[in-house]
Amino acid sequence: MRESSYPLAGLRQRIARIAASGGFESRPAEGWLKSGHASFDDALGGGLAVGRCHEFFAADALDATSAAAFAALLALRTPGRAPLVWLRTSDAGKRSGHIYAPGIAELGGDPDRLLLVETPDAKMLLACANDAIRCAGSAAVIVESWGRFPLFDLTAGRRLALGARDAGTTLLMLRLNAAPAPSVAETRWSVAAAASHALEANAPGAPAFDLELLRWRGGAAGMRWRLDWNHDEQSFSPNAGDTALSGTLLSLPARRAMASHGAEAA
């Protein structure tokens, strides 16, 4: 995992050199970033659209680490060994923790694919994001921000979205300790930690995540999912311990109707 304590002026050139030295191919402008969970991917028409912007919000400030882990694991599922660019401000480690390369390897990912760039402030973060997203040699770009991000308005978001589309690079916006707001994202998600099921000898279970689809340009939102990470398959999979919750779809209106019915019954 390559790290930088300051933004790289030649970020686009560096990514291109990394891609060229490894014989990587540019990502296709169309396609799907699949989770590996068949029902989840099918419900989205194939997975998360490649070359589009997708937002991930932590359901609670305490879920910031889980949201970051989900975005990282999803990005690591991009095929091949093309670089994955992770952009964050220099104070991000103080707020949400530092990225731990051995931990990524333990989960089945390749930390050497990550190019970590830390910027001094949000302005430089957005500038680097605009450079990185237009690098056809990168497979995905993760932009991690904490709290309000006023510079990331509709105009800035549209510029990033167009860059992602033109380069065929998937943009994952990791919005921690922030409230969802209107944007040009293809999908918007709320991510929370889910209780994992212990393994033999009461060993810690696989990472598990509760997801809610808050917005989807291609269809209805309001779907909820429980996904577990499968280390051996290096993919997300149904919850083996509770199949009744795995891949369950429940529309937002249906959940509200159920809640209203429960309130009336009470």
Image (cartoon, rainbow, N blue to C red):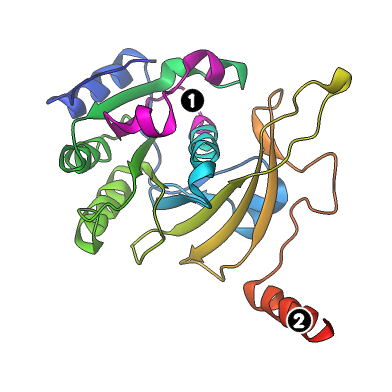
Identify the residue shown where x is 34% and y is 44%.
146
Give the label on residue 80, or none: 1
Residue 239 screen position, x and y as percent? 78, 42
Tell me which residue sits at (23%, 60%) in the image: 153
Q: Secondary structure at mark 1?
A: loop
Is 82 in the magenta?
A: yes
The mark found on residue 221 in the picture is none
Which image quadrant: the N terminus? top left
Q: Is residue 101 above or below residue 212?
A: above
Mark 2 lies on a secondary structure that is: helix
Q: In front: 30, or 120?
A: 120
- Residue 131: image quadrant is top left
Side (left or right) of 45 relative to 15: right
- Tag count: 2
**Front in this rendered view, residue 17 or 231:** 231
- Kind of residue indicated by mark 1: Gly
Q: Amino acid at mark 2?
A: Ala
Magenta-colored span: 75-104
Q: Position of residue 118 (x, y in %)?
A: 26, 27
Q: Which quarter of the rendering shows the C terminus?
A: bottom right
Residue 203 placed where, x, y %? 79, 20
The residue at which mark 2 appears reads as 263
Q: 101 left or right of 237? A: left
Q: Earlier in the sequence, mark 1 or mark 2?
A: 1
